[in-house]
Image (cartoon, rainbow, N blue to C red):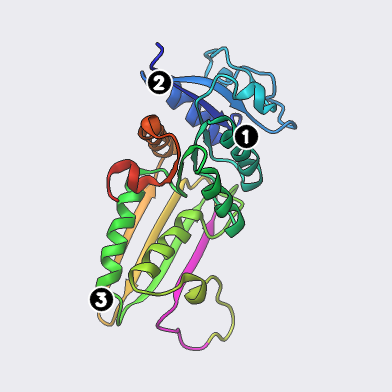
Amino acid sequence: MNNLLKIAIAGASGRMGHMLIEAVNAADDTQLAGALDVASSPAIGQDAAAFSGKLSGVAISADLSAGLADADYLIDFTRPEGTLKYLEYCAEHGIKMIIGTTGFDDAGKAAIAEAAKKTAIVFAPNMSVGVTVTMKLLELAAKSFAEGYDIEIIEAHHRHKVDAPSGTALKMGEVIASAIGRDLNEVAVYAREGETGERDPSSIGFATIRGGDIVGDHTVLFAGIGERVEISHKSSSRVTYANGSLRAARFLQDKQHGLFDMNDVIGLR
C-alpha cells in the first residue's frame, strides 16, 4: 500500500472533479489523499466520493494545509486564480502538480514555470492522449500546408465553459504557428463581423461554439484551392482527461522538479 500514488483533487465537487475522483478510486495504483474546493462550495465538509454512493473517508476542504496534508500530487482543472494559489503552496511543500486549467495569461504561465524549479509539474491545456497525438499530426500537416492553404481552427464546448477560445484550440494554434514560422499573437483572428475584406493568407482563424453538453470538439481546417484537409479530435467523455491525468502523475513519480507536458508523458518529445 505504501507505493500508492497519493493524489488530491482540486475542484472536487465539480464535473471534472467527480470524474477525477472516480478515476483515482478505480485505479489500483492510486489513492485519494485529499479534496479541495472553494470555501463557498456547499460540498465543504462532505465526503469527496459521496456523489458516487461510496465513501472515501476524505472530506472536501477549503483549507490547503488540511486538504493537502497527506497528498504527494495535486490534480487541478479549476480556474487560473485558484490554480495559482494552489501552485504557490505546492511549490513550497514539494507537492507535484498536474495542471489542466486553461485561461492563463503570460504572467500565470511564468509563475508555473518558476514553481517548476521547486517541484515537478505537468502542465497541458488538454490531458487527452488523443489530443496530444493530434497536436503532432497538426505540426506535420502545417509544415506541408504552409503555403497556399488557409488555416482555421473550430472548437465546440458545453454551455458552462467560461473561456474562449479553448486552451486546446489556442495550443493547436501555437503548434501550427511555430511549425510554419509565425507568431500566433500576430496572426490570430478571433472574430469576424461585418465587412472584413479578403482573408489575410498569413492569418490563423478561430471559431468558437458553445452549447449543450458538448465535452470538447476541435477541428483544424487546411483549405486550399480544389481541396481541403480536416484534422479533428472529438471527446465523448471527460474520462479521457482523467485517465491522461493519472498517466501524468505516474510519469512524475521519479521527477523532483521540472516543467513537463503531455508530449513528455507519452514519449513524443
CA gap, disc 3 and disc 2 = 46 Å
111 displayed left or right of 181 = right
**Label 3: element kind:** loop
Q: Nearer the viewer, residue 8 or 219?
A: 8
Residue 89, numbered label: 1
- Residue 64 lies left or right of residue 190; in this view the side is right
Identified by mark 1, the residue type is Tyr
State which tag comes first along the sequence, 1 or 2: 2
The location of residue 160, given as percent across then percent down, is 60, 47
Numbered disc in front, either 3 or 1: 1
Specify the amino acid type for callout 3: Glu
| Mark 1 vs 2: CB contact within 8 A | no
Image point (50%, 43%), residue name: 116
Q: N-terminal of the two: label 3 or label 2?
A: 2
Q: Which mark is residue 227?
A: 3
Q: Is residue 209 magenta?
A: yes
Residue located farthest toward the bottom when viewing the structure as drawn? 197
